[in-house]
Image (cartoon, rainbow, N blue to C red):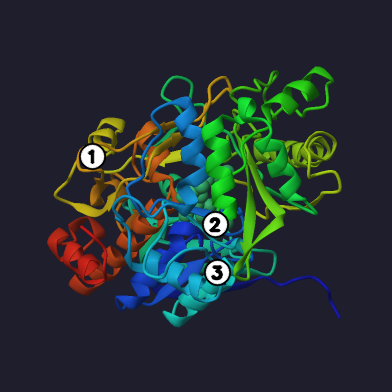
């Protein structure tokens, strides 16, 4: 018997094809299917949720208007308490809220049914399962291990994609394709224009490989924080102690004195791509994980800026950066054990399944949302939803601390439908962190609630376009807004 693989060629058809089953893609697929389309959802990995679940970014920012800090000291208090805050107007509902409610019902999220906190905390492992349930219930045909390797384009119109491995080559022909790959892979391959990183040098925000540490005695860590108000600020200390007492979520900030000490001894890992660490501006946060209805004070997820000036769309660069970040996670665990009270016997449980990419391509659409639009809280006639999260831009060379700016005007801006239409290409929509914005506006729209909202808008628009037999660009905006509003999304 010959062992040589004979490759099978097949062609499959769908009304709507969603590429990327991440934060935006799963919502896009549900929305398209619920609005009557036959949907295929392609995901190159073995789970849905992308950065939201496998990336372990376990806080949805923000389904509410989110206040920005007024000073450096205030910033510490705000960062500590966003996860427990129900203050300020909630702006994002619909599928995002339905999903959170399902998570709340099984102890996989912290909060109150029907509402979301300013940074909604959830269990990223159970998220994968709940998302699968929702997508399958909507009737979506999900394909895992389906990496798109080519895009079928003619006359500037996307006709579908190719998914290929050593055994099968499948052409999926679709009437409308939604690019929810985070990196804008399908748009770029189809010939759409894109921008990359900052306008000066094209540098992107740093990458992060989330890591989890177990065996932490957090009460000892909190005792250290309590006895060092000069290091953390008295307001931060009292906020965290109160949140802990009330059983609410909170964030542990960097141990700057310990970092300085370790730096002097050469025992603090340098981020990938940086030659120096500034202990005063370093960005990292640790949080007790919420699992099966309880905060686990011995199990903390850690998020720190780890890899600088990386092009995440370049396989070689991303490989080097990934190895660099894993190396940092292992060495950070050693740093914590040696320097941070409460961590003496702690261990690295795992690093995230998916590398956290904050920024890569931004597809140029029919309209590009700007920093000015966001900060002024601009309303647009083709708005698909209201958004009011803080603008969160991480410094590209680690010299300054995190920039958090607040949306002005009425506290929210519209995301225009035109930002989801790649300029010059037909039958293609884009959702998620790579929609058409400038690099500062992206610091706002890359947040998960915005990704979910653009996912829902693209899925709904694709289904409406098919019903009316028009291209996505010609969808009746008023009708799209009416359908979204009827599904509980504020317009
Ligand atoms: C470290 C970090 C911390 C963050 N913190 C927060 C936070 O606290 N709160 C918040 O709201 N946001 C946060 N963000 C931002 C937010 O999590 C992301 O911007 C958002 O989740 C991206 O969603 P997406 O759908 O665009 O991409 P993803 O969720 O990454 O999904 C893209 C999917 O496409 C798939 N894919 C890609 N290419 C292909 C292909 N060729 N074929 C098939 N499948 C493909 C990928 O496997 C992936 O599943 C953070 C981001 C990072 C990196």
Locate residue 185 relative to residue 31 in the image: left or right.
right
Q: Residues within 10 Å of mark 3 (few under 14, many from 20)?
A: some
Residue 377 image label: 1
Disc 1 or 3, which lies upstream in sequence?
3
Given residues 177 and 272, the one toward you in this image is 272
Q: Which residue is mark 2?
A: 246
Q: Residue at x 83, y 26 (%)?
A: 267
- Give whichever of discs 2 and 3 has the lower sequence position: 3
- Residue of label 3: 170
Tag 1–tag 3 contact (CB < 8 Å):
no
- Disc 2 residue crowd, few under 14, some 14–19, many 20+, Cα 10 Å: few
State whether residue 229 appears in this view. Answer: yes
Q: Could you say whether the residue bearing mark 3 is in a helix, strand or loop?
A: strand
Which x, y percent locates residue 5? 75, 71
Q: Quadrant of residue 115?
A: bottom left
Residue at mark 2 to residue at mark 3: CA–CA distance: 54 Å
- Residue 358 visible? The answer is no
């Amino acid at each position: 018997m010959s062992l040589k693989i004979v490759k099978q060629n097949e062609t499959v058809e769908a009304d709507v094809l969603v590429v990327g089953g991440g934060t935006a893609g799963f919502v896009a697929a549900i929305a398209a299917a619920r609005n009557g389309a036959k949907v295929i959802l392609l995901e190159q990995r073995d789970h849905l949720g992308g950065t939201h679940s496998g990336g372990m970014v376990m806080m949805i920012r923000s389904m509410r208007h989110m206040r920005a800090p007024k000073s450096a000291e205030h910033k510490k208090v705000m960062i500590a308490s966003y996860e427990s805050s129900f203050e300020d107007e909630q702006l994002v509902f619909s599928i995002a809220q339905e999903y959170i409610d399902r998570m709340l019902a099984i102890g996989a999220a912290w909060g109150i049914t029907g509402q979301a906190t300013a940074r909604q905390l959830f269990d990223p492992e159970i998220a994968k399962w709940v998302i699968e349930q929702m997508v399958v219930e909507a009737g979506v045909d999900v394909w895992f291990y389906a990496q798109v390797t080519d895009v079928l384009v003619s006359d500037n119109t996307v006709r579908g994609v190719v998914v290929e491995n050593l055994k099968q080559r499948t052409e999926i022909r679709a009437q409308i394709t939604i690019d929810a790959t985070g990196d804008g892979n399908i748009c770029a391959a189809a010939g759409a224009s894109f921008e990359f990183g900052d306008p000066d040098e094209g540098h992107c925000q740093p990458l992060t490989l989330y890591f989890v540490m177990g065996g932490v005695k957090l009460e000892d860590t909190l005792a250290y924080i309590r006895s060092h108000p000069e290091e953390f600020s008295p307001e931060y200390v009292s906020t965290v102690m109160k949140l802990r007492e009330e059983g609410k979520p909170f964030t542990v900030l960097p141990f700057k004195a310990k970092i300085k000490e370790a730096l002097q001894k050469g025992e603090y890992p340098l981020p990938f791509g940086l030659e120096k660490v500034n202990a005063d501006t370093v960005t990292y946060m640790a949080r007790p994980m919420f699992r099966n209805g309880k905060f686990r004070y011995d199990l903390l997820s850690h998020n720190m800026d780890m890899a600088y000036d990386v092009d995440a769309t370049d396989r070689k660069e991303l490989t080097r950066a990934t190895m660099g970040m894993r190396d940092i996670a292992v060495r950070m665990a050693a740093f914590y054990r040696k320097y941070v009270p409460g961590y003496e016997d702690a261990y690295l449980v795992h690093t995230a399944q998916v590398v956290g990419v904050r920024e890569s391509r931004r597809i140029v659409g029919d309209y590009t949302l700007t920093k000015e639009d966001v900060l002024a809280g601009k309303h647009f006639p083709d708005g698909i939803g209201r958004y009011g999260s803080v603008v969160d831009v991480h410094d590209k060379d680690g010299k300054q601390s995190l920039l958090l700016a607040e949306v002005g005007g009425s506290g929210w801006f519209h995301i225009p439908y035109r930002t989801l239409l790649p300029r010059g290409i037909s039958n293609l929509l884009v959702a998620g962190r790579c929609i058409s914005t400038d690099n500062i506006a992206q610091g706002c729209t890359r947040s998960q609630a915005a990704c979910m909202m653009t996912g829902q808008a693209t899925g709904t628009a694709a289904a409406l376009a098919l019903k009316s037999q028009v291209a996505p660009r010609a969808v009746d905006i008023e009708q799209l807004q009416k359908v979204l509003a009827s599904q509980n999304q504020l317009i």
